[in-house]
Image: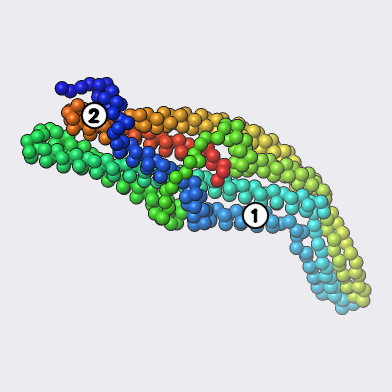
Amino acid sequence: MKRTRKQVTAMLHQHKRNTLKVLLLTFLGVLSQAVYAQNNVDEFLSLVEQNNQELKAAYKLMEAQQMGFQTGLTPDNPSIEYGHFPGKQEEIGNKTTYGISQSFDFPTVYSVRKKLANDQSQLSEYEYQLFRQAKLLEAQLGFYQYAFLLKKQRILQKRLEHAEQLYQSYQTKFERGNASVLDVNKARIQYLKTKSNNQLLVQELDAQQRDLQLLSGQTPDTLVIVSNPANELPSLETVLSDMQQLQPEVRYLQQAQQVADRQIKLAKQNWLPELELGYESEKAGDGTYRGVRGGLSIPLWKDKNKVKQAKAQAIFEEQRYSSRLSSLVSETQKRYKQAEELNKIWKEYDQTLKEAANIGFLDKALQLGHLSVIDYFNELAFYYETIDTAMEIENNYIQTLAKLQAYKL
């Protein structure tokens, strides 16, 4: 006599303390061993930082930009002049002149220009840090996805072994006349479905491994996924505070404001006159003239509107910082809420799986005749789906948590 799902579930709950929970224990064991390892993530990210070609190129670009900012901070090159002017008449004689001169900006300009160059160099470094963070976050998420796929493969391998044993068992029963061809076909379909899923997962793992190898320059095969309990969600206040202090984008925008303010000071300094000093000598006939000369340029038109332009740029940088900071805070709050909800759902799934009937119960019920083959496979599919959903939710939580705390990279 076939029983309803509620009756079977009640019976299974009565016996669950005395029944070996093989698959569930296996699942939980895999979870404890395949949770994303912080030490291994750090090791992998270190490889990425050392070997990634894009990061190396970005660092070289930063160095080139910083060297460029440090040029043009000294006065212009000195100028040397020489002239020889033959006279048309012998009594006039020849005229010879030579001189050396040096032009330079007003002395205070060099101090402001040097500070501006230092600020721009720091801005370039923050720009590199922003690119570095994005690349390391990409690598971190890729590593977590690889760990997730490895965990999924272990579970699928267990399912494949179970499906193969079940299929072989029904083939034997069919040959002995104890099972119908429909039962054999259902077992065979389940086996082929599990086998194809496993093969597709192997291909996905291979593709993910290639991506990680491209990022780090090395294969992740040697990285062993070990237990890591440090996946707890910190408080929102802590996340917001750390984000505003450590996020490279926030630092970049703050530094851009400082550069804009320094540009205003330099633009004002450019209204000071440029100076020129020189020494000249002139020989004409029997007379020789020597002496120094000096001059200055009057800045009437060359730097017109530069102060206004610098002030407008400073206003833009201030507004950009304020707007972007508000956006970052809002994005962080949304992501935190998402992580909080995912964590809550995953814990509910975890608790449900601990209390639910597992494959051991289903096999027992099938052997005792309490479940038909159709009901068995329906229950099995439902159980597998629950485990898969729990793993997906856990993976989404880990990925969201990594994005939330990207400022730590």
User: Residue 130 at x, y = what percent?
Assistant: 57, 45
Q: Which mark is residue 378?
A: 2
| Distance in Å between CA atoms under marks 1 and 2 | 65 Å
Closer to us: 188 or 254:
188
- Give the label, 1 or 2, closer to the camera: 2
* 94 left or right, relative to 253: right
Secondary structure, mark 2, is: helix
Q: How many residues crowd around disc 2 within 10 Å: few (fewer than 14), some, or many (20 or more)?
A: few
Q: Amino acid at mark 1?
A: Gln
| Residue at left offset 52%, top offset 35% | 233
* 336 left or right, relative to 4: right
Residue 220 lies, with reference to residue 395, above or below; the image says below
Q: Which residue is mark 1?
A: 66
Closer to us: 242 or 343:
343
| Residue at left offset 82%, top offset 54% | 107
User: Residue 322 at x, y = what percent?
Assistant: 64, 33
| Residue at left offset 74%, top offset 50% | 115
* 281 left or right, relative to 169: right
| Residue at left offset 85%, top offset 73% | 95
Closer to us: 368 or 328:
368
Q: Which mark is residue 319?
A: none
Q: Amino acid at mark 2?
A: Asn
Quick one: which residue is furthest to the front in this view?
18
